[in-house]
């Protein structure tokens, strides 16, 4: 009986490339950052039910994953797998890119506050020009 079990284990190890059959946890999520070298941040969203009110709500969690070839872009949907600790926060590795995103980051996200501050500055400048033009007209009328 033990010999039969040993033969089955040997067969499964040879068919899986020498790795045991136990699977590690995998998650599917959206890449939200790839600014680090060989590291991506993946947002995994899941539905949970409130224990008292029985209403479902979304819970998002961020995972740092190892991307050896830097192939992921923002907006990609990827599958990650748990692995040994690679750094302080990185405990996952990229398995596959399921769906490519557009790779285009929204302008508001990239520029953030710069756009609003620039718009405010332009609006203030336009407002001052309008006031300045009125003051010049009043000065000309007073000179006549």
Image: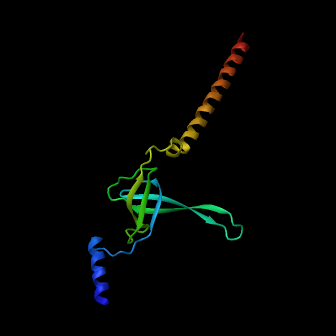
- Furthest toward the bottom, the residue is 1
Residue 35 visible in the displayed image: no
Relative depth, front residue between 118 and 133: 118
Q: Which residue lies at the image location 39% right of the left edge and 70% below the top edge? A: 83
Q: Quick check: 51 above or below 105?
A: below
Q: Is residue 143 left or right of residue 65?
A: right
Q: Which residue lies at the image location 66% right of the left edge and 67% below the top edge? A: 50
**Occupied quadrant, residue 108:** top right
Q: Quick check: 48 above or below 131?
A: below
- Furthest toward the top, the residue is 144
Q: Is residue 140 left or right of residue 26?
A: right
Relative depth, front residue between 18 and 44: 18
Q: Locate the C terminus and report the quarter of the image it occupies.
A: top right
Relative depth, front residue between 47 and 120: 47
**x and y percent of residue 129 in the render?**
63, 25
Q: Is residue 119 left or right of residue 4?
A: right
**x and y percent of residue 88 in the render?**
42, 69
Residue 132 visible in the displayed image: yes
Q: Quick check: 110 above or below 126?
A: below
**Occupied quadrant, residue 22:** bottom left
Q: Quick check: 86 above or below 69?
A: below
Q: How is the image coloured?
A: rainbow
Q: Locate the N terminus and report the quarter of the image it occupies.
A: bottom left
Relative depth, front residue between 32 and 126: 32
Q: Is residue 71 left or right of residue 129?
A: left
């Amino acid at each position: 009986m033990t010999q039969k079990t040993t033969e089955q284990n040997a067969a499964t190890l040879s068919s899986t490339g020498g790795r045991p059959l136990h699977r590690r946890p995998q998650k599917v999520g959206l890449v939200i950052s790839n600014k680090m070298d060989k590291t991506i941040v993946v947002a995994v969203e899941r539905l949970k039910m409130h224990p008292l009110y029985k209403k479902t709500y979304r819970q998002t969690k961020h995972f740092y994953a190892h991307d050896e070839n830097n192939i992921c872009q923002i907006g990609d949907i990827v599958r990650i797998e748990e692995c040994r600790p690679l750094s302080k926060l990185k405990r996952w590795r990229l398995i596959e890119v399921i769906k490519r995103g557009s790779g285009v980051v929204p302008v508001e996200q990239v520029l953030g506050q710069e756009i609003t501050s620039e718009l405010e500055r332009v609006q203030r400048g336009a407002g001052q020009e309008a006031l300045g033009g009125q003051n010049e007209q009043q000065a000309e009328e007073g000179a006549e």
